[in-house]
Amino acid sequence: MDILTFIIVTAVLAGVTYFVRIIFLSHALVFLYVALMVILGISLGNKAGESLGEFFFADRLGLIFYVVLVIVSLLSAVHYIKFVHDRRVVPSSVALHNAGTILFTGAIVGVLFTSHFGTLWAFMEATTLGASVLIYHNRNQDSLEATWKYLFVCSIGIAIAFAGILFLGLAAHKVGHIDFTFAAIKTEAPRLNPIWLQACFLLVLTGFSVKMGLVPLFNVDIDAKDASPSQVGASLSSVLMNAGFVAIYRFYDAFSGTTILPWMNRLLMITGLVSLFFAAAYLLKVKNIKRLFAYSSMEHASLVIIAFSCGGVGYFAAVLHLIMHSLAKSSLFFQVSQMHRIYASKMDDGIGSYLRINPLGGLVLLLGFLSIIAMPPSGMLITELMMFQALVAKNFWWLAVLILILVLVIIYGLAVRLLGILFLKKPLAKINTGGASPYESILQLGLILAVFYIGLFRPDFIVRNIELALKALPL
Amino acid sequence: MINFVIILFIITLIYLSKVEMVKSYYPLMGLQGLLLFGLALLELHEVDALQLAFILLETLIFKAIFVPLFLLRITRGKIHRHQNSPVKGYYAVFIALVIIVLSFITSHEMHDEFLDVKYFTAATSSILIGLFIAINNRDLVTHLIAYLVIENGIFLLSLALGSELPMFVNAAILLDIFTSVLIMGIFFNKLKDYFQNTDISQLSQLKD
C-alpha cells in the first residue's frame, strides 16, 4: 500500500465510520484501520529513507514515531471499547469519536511522512480538526469549553505557522523558483536571507507549540487533556506531541546548515526553559490528576526541546526520550480512566489507597510514576542523564543546575499527589471496585515495562534507527 | 488600481477594529473577500484556468459569499451587539492605526528587493489587527471574525509573496480553512445553545 492511497482510504473510512451507528461495527472499523496502518508500516519499512513521490518520503524519524503511533492507536481503540460499555455512550457519539480517531490518526501519519512544508501545514491543521472532535466526546460544559478553546487557539497558532512558511517563500525568491520540499529548502537554505529564515522558524515554533505542549500556547492543550476521555488525553500527550516535535524538527533540519543554527538552538533552549518553569509552577498547585499528567507531559516536552537544543548527544536523547515518554504517559492516561470508574472522581482529594483497592492498577500507577520521574529502572533516566551530559558538554553548568532544581520541584509535586493516591487512606465518598479491569492494566503494564526494557537494554534496532534518522544533523 | 484596492482593504481593517454592532461584520467580511478577489486578479497576470477557478472559489465564493452568509446564519440575527470590550470606539481605531503605521515602518525598513511594501503592510496589519480583535473582545462571534481577519491577512501575504505552492497543497489548505470555519461555526452554535449567550467569561470552568 502506498501512502497516498492510505490517506485517501483514511478520508473514506472516516466518512463511512461516521455513518455507522452499530457500535460493534464502528469499533471494528477502527481496528481495520489499525490493521491497515500495520500493512502501511511494513511497506514503508522496506523503503526506509526513500522518496515516495512528490509530497511524501519514508523518513526514518517518521517511521520511528509511526511505530509508536500504531501501538498507542491500537491500545486507545481497545480502551475505548471498555469506556463505551461503562459509560453507555450513545451510538452517534461512538460513530463521531471513531471517525474523528481515524481522521486524527491519518493526519498524524501525513505529518510524519510528508516531505513538503505546505502539506506538512495542511496535515497539522487536519490534526486540529480531528482532535477537536475527540475532545468534544463527553458533550458537557467542560468538553465544550475545551473544544472551543483548542479549536480557536490551534487555528490561530497554525495560521501563524503558515505565515512562517510564507516567509520561507519570501526568502526562497532570492534563488528563483524553488519548491517547498524539505530537501530543496535544505540545499538552498545557506543562500537564503537569514532574517527571513529566523522569522520563519520563530513563527513555526510559536504556531506548533500548541501541538507539543510548550509555551506560549500550552494552556489549551492542558484543558483539552483534562476535558477529553482518558484515551484521547493519552493520544494528545504522546502521538500528537511527537507530531509537533517532527514538524518543528523538519524546519530545524532544513535550516541546520545555515548561520542561524546557534540562534535556533538558543530559541529552543529559552522555549524549553520557560516551559519547564511553567510546568513546575503549575504542577505544585494542581489537584486534578489528568491536569497533573498534562503538566508532566509539558515538563517532558520541555526536556526534549532543551536536549535537542544542545545538539550532539542531545539529539539522540530527545528522540529516545519522546518514544519512552509516549509509552509511559499513554499508559498513565489509560489508567486514569480506570481510577475514574472506581472513584468517580479525578481530583486527588477524592482518591486514596489505590494500591490496596486495585493492586494491578496501583502497580501501573506506581511504575508509571517511577518512569515519568526518571527513577531507575526507567529508561528516561538514561535520556535525562544524556541531556545533562549534553548541557555540560556545552559548558551550560548553571543551566544544568537550574533545570535540575526545576525537575526536582516537579518530582516533589508529582510525588505528593501520586504517592498520596497510592498509599494514603482518605475519606472516600463511594468506591466501585468493579471498575477495576485487569486486562486493561496488563496492557498498560506492558507499556511501562517496555520503557524499562528500552532503558536497561537499549535495543540495537532502536538505537541504530535513531542514529540513522538524525545523521543529517550537524554535530 | 492595486493601491486603491489595498487602501480600501486597510480601511475595512480600521472599521473592523471599532465595530460594535454584530451585523456590521458581515458586509465588511464580504467586502474583504471581494477586495481579495480583485487583488488576486490584478496581481496574477499569468493565471491559468485552473488557478483562476481556484482563486474564484477561495475568495469570491468562500470569503465573499459563504463566510458572511454562514455567520449570519449561525447568529440568526439574535446577537446584535457584542459584549463589552476593554478598548472601545476611537481608542480601538487609534490602536489599529498604530498597528498599520508600525507594519508600514517595519516593511519599509526590511530593504528586501523581493518584498512588496504595500502588500506586506496590509497583510501584517490584517494579522495583527485580527489578533487585537481576538484579545480585545469577550465575545465568541467576534473571535470567529478575528480568525477570519487573520486568515485574510495570510491570504494577502501569500499573494504578496507570490508563493509557488502546488495546486494540491493550495487545495488542501483551502479545505482545512473551510472545515475549520465550519467546525467553529458548529461549536459556536453549541456554545450559544448551552450558555444562552456568547460571552467568553462563561468559558472559565476549566482551571487548575
Image (tube, grey):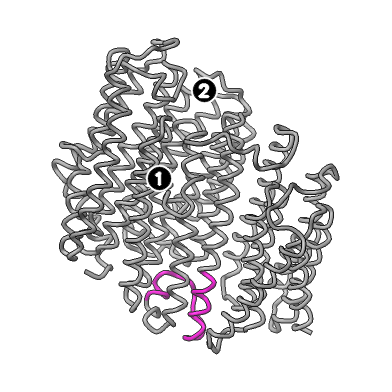
The secondary structure type at the circle numbered 2 is helix
Mark 1 chain: A
For the point 28% across and 53% down, the residue is A319
A163 and A239: which is toward the camera: A163
**Range shown magenta:** A165-186
Tell me where residue B181 appears, x and y as whole percent: 68, 51
Residue B112, above or below A126: below
Tell me where residue A409 appears, x and y as whole percent: 28, 41
Q: Callout 2: few (<14), some (14-19), or many (20+) C-alpha neighbours within 10 Å? A: some
Give the amino acid type for the residue marked by disc 2 in the picture: Val
Q: Which residue is mark 2?
A: A84
Q: Which residue is mark 1?
A: A239
Tell me where residue A159 appears, x and y as whole percent: 57, 60
Q: Callout 1: few (<14), some (14-19), or many (20+) C-alpha neighbours within 10 Å? A: many
Residue A184 painted magenta: yes
Whole-angstrom CA distance, mark 2 to mark 1, is 22 Å
Mark 2 chain: A
To the question of a shared chain for discs 2 and 1, the answer is yes
